[in-house]
Amino acid sequence: MSTTLKTLPPELAVSEWFNTPAPLSLAALRGRPVFLHSFQLLCPGCVAESIPQVQRIERIFGHTDLQIIGIHTVFEHHAAMSPVTLGAFLHEYRIKHPVGVDLADEQSDTPITMQRFGLRGTPSSILFDRDGSVAYQAFGVEADLAVGARIAMALSNRTAVIGSQKSLFGADERCVDGQCKVSSQSTA
Amino acid sequence: MSTTLKTLPPELAVSEWFNTPAPLSLAALRGRPVFLHSFQLLCPGCVAESIPQVQRIERIFGHTDLQIIGIHTVFEHHAAMSPVTLGAFLHEYRIKHPVGVDLADEQSDTPITMQRFGLRGTPSSILFDRDGSVAYQAFGVEADLAVGARIAMALSNRTAVIGSQKSLFGADERCVDGQCKVSSQSTA
Amino acid sequence: MSTTLKTLPPELAVSEWFNTPAPLSLAALRGRPVFLHSFQLLCPGCVAESIPQVQRIERIFGHTDLQIIGIHTVFEHHAAMSPVTLGAFLHEYRIKHPVGVDLADEQSDTPITMQRFGLRGTPSSILFDRDGSVAYQAFGVEADLAVGARIAMALSNRTAVIGSQKSLFGADERCVDGQCKVSSQSTA
Amino acid sequence: MSTTLKTLPPELAVSEWFNTPAPLSLAALRGRPVFLHSFQLLCPGCVAESIPQVQRIERIFGHTDLQIIGIHTVFEHHAAMSPVTLGAFLHEYRIKHPVGVDLADEQSDTPITMQRFGLRGTPSSILFDRDGSVAYQAFGVEADLAVGARIAMALSNRTAVIGSQKSLFGADERCVDGQCKVSSQSTA
């Protein structure tokens, strides 16, 4: 007799939350798709491109049960991007969705959540399927058409149709152009 | 014993094709999703917005079996937008997908395909599901995130998740903000 | 006793005018600065960039005596860009300033005005000083900051400060990056 | 016998400079035109619009003797926009021109330079003529065409041609649309 065990991705590690009355966890959000946006407030590409994209996602998918979470993954200029500055930033840019401060690691410039998911820089994003597995992980900003397609798939509990011919048919390997899916392996 | 009959949308009426060795028909494309883009070459919103969007759709969904078709639905300035001018336009804007000239109606300024689908102006677009039914019909240019989501649904043979809470659950009524689905009714 | 003769640039050659009750000529406009915009209606760079720039120039400098003139310099796809199509184009893009159709040359694809000024393609622009001489001639679209500076100079009867160190000090040679001033020489 | 006395605008009050080996002063810059850009690093309009415009000004007018100065005029979220954060911001946005931190006022949220020039918010800009007088002062971001024209006038030692018919002819009153010139009066 065999049982299938699915290794789930790691949990968020957050030292402080904004825009939410209570801390969030990926575990507690199981059942809903989650769009996680990793950014730094002094990252020009985040301010000019990925944050506006997240705000478009909020507008277009606001009627669905997609949960959007920002995570402030500071890996440089730590003193310059304190939670005090982040709070004012969220206010000025009218960011209303929950944002967590990635937990600092005393041994490394790279904070804990960033390490756990192997994020290569900012902006990055991770889309989680309803079962908690990683549907897609990207470094940089992807085209809205592709992001919309992936979110639609996650909302309808399907695997991604975008990225390569392979992924259309549910291939295990989802690394495309350096953007890799965190492994979610099955064992019998 | 009952059989289900589905009324399909009308067929294209085209007087001349560009960028295809043989005429296309919706009937022959049954089984594939189709994105139909209705435009006029002197329509500023088409040139500035919807044509670039169609070209992004080609790029992002080029590896799938989505068929993109342009239809030149001239309902004003007929002498100014002849097929000769259209041919040069397609060349200059590097439009490579099949484009049909909507068949003129001697009794009306509005050409036949435009009449059949009740198109209100340009740009308009119609997304057809694999079974030939209309998944979505829009006047104007919609957000890429929403268009990407709808195409993903059509590719995976699902009904639209975007537009309203109702459509998420497959409601019959798909008119949202004045953009209406051409009816595809079932009878027993 | 010496007299100074200044060779003026050539005159426009126009077969048909739009948006003006009477034909225009550079000679009759002597005393005012003139911004001449050379375009084709099927030129993507004209539609996307230079025509919007001309419309910004109209808005910003509308209170001055700057005269804006468009010239439809068709050098390809002649049958596709007839005056009938141009008329509809000007209507749809809400172009209100005078536009002349560059006079066709039976011996060449390049029309007469385009030949006379040595225009290399579309979009191009020529700024004329109040004395009728060419202040600047450009192929392509220049930055608004530079265009604004040059127009201000023409309005105040000064030579250009932009383009190169040399031109700041009134050098005779004004060819910069392949964009050349049509010669306006002095003889005694 | 009469002498003309011209009241010059106030001096900058700066607590710390970036991107310059020595402090700058308007007095020491007399003889050169100066473009002063007032911003805050958490001001969305500054990041999206006025800072890119200043960088275009640097590129287009880099060969002239125009001096560009940024001044970080923090009037809100003071703890969030410390000099440490400003330093990282200048690094990340590749801002190379001199930037001064406007001197804090213990009695007010508004810093000293901002008070002295009556700046109403960020972004603001002030263009100084070669004689040290204010050629133009604006709140918000103006069109590049107008900014380019004003800078050209300042470079050639002329009064502004843009903004209103009046200013073309050197009127004393230069308040246009709420954007006012700090008075520079002559007495005999």
Image (cartoon, coloured by chain):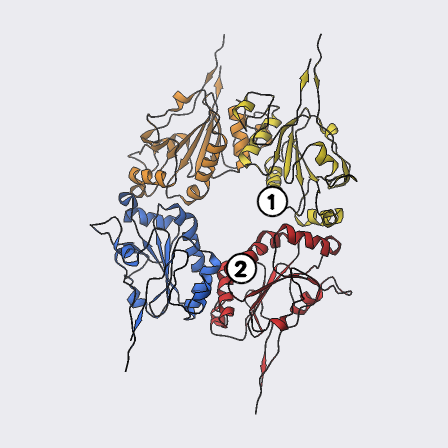
Chain colours: A red, B blue, C orange, D yellow
Q: Quadrant of residue D23?
A: top right
Residue type, mark 2 in image: Ile
In the image, residue B86 sits, relative to residue A180, either above or below, namely above
Q: Which residue, as the protein is rendered here, is positioned at the far front? A: A21
User: At which x and y percent is residue C99?
Assistant: 37, 32
Q: In the image shown, does C173 or A58 lie closer to the viewer?
A: A58
The quadrant the N terminus of chain A occupies is bottom right
User: At which x and y percent is residue B47?
Assistant: 40, 48
Asked if one can make out residue C163 in the rendered structure from this viewpoint, the answer is no
The structure residue drawn at horizontal position 73% and vertical position 35%, both measured from the top left corner, is D113
Asked if one can make out residue A144 in the rendered structure from this viewpoint, the answer is yes
- Residue beneath disc 2: A57
In the image, is D166 to the left or to the right of B105? right
Q: Which residue, as the protein is rendered here, is positioned at the far bottom? A: A1
> Residue D170 shows which numbered tag?
none
In the image, residue D97 sits, relative to residue B4, either above or below, namely above
Q: Quadrant of residue C120?
A: top left
Q: Quadrant of residue C97?
A: top left
The structure residue drawn at horizontal position 62% and vertical position 39%, both measured from the top left corner, is D54
- Residue beneath disc 1: D45
The structure residue drawn at horizontal position 37% and vertical position 52%, both measured from the top left corner, is B123
**3D distance between C-alphas at marks 1 and 2:** 22 Å
Q: Which residue, as the protein is rendered here, is positioned at the far left? A: B106
User: At which x and y percent is residue C160?
Assistant: 55, 28
Count of numbered circles on the image: 2
Q: In the image shown, does D186 or C105 lie closer to the viewer?
A: D186
Q: Residues within 10 Å of mark 1 (few under 14, many from 20)?
A: some
Q: Chain of mark 1?
A: D
What kind of element bears circle 1? helix
What kind of element bears circle 2? helix
In the image, is A120 to the left or to the right of C34? right
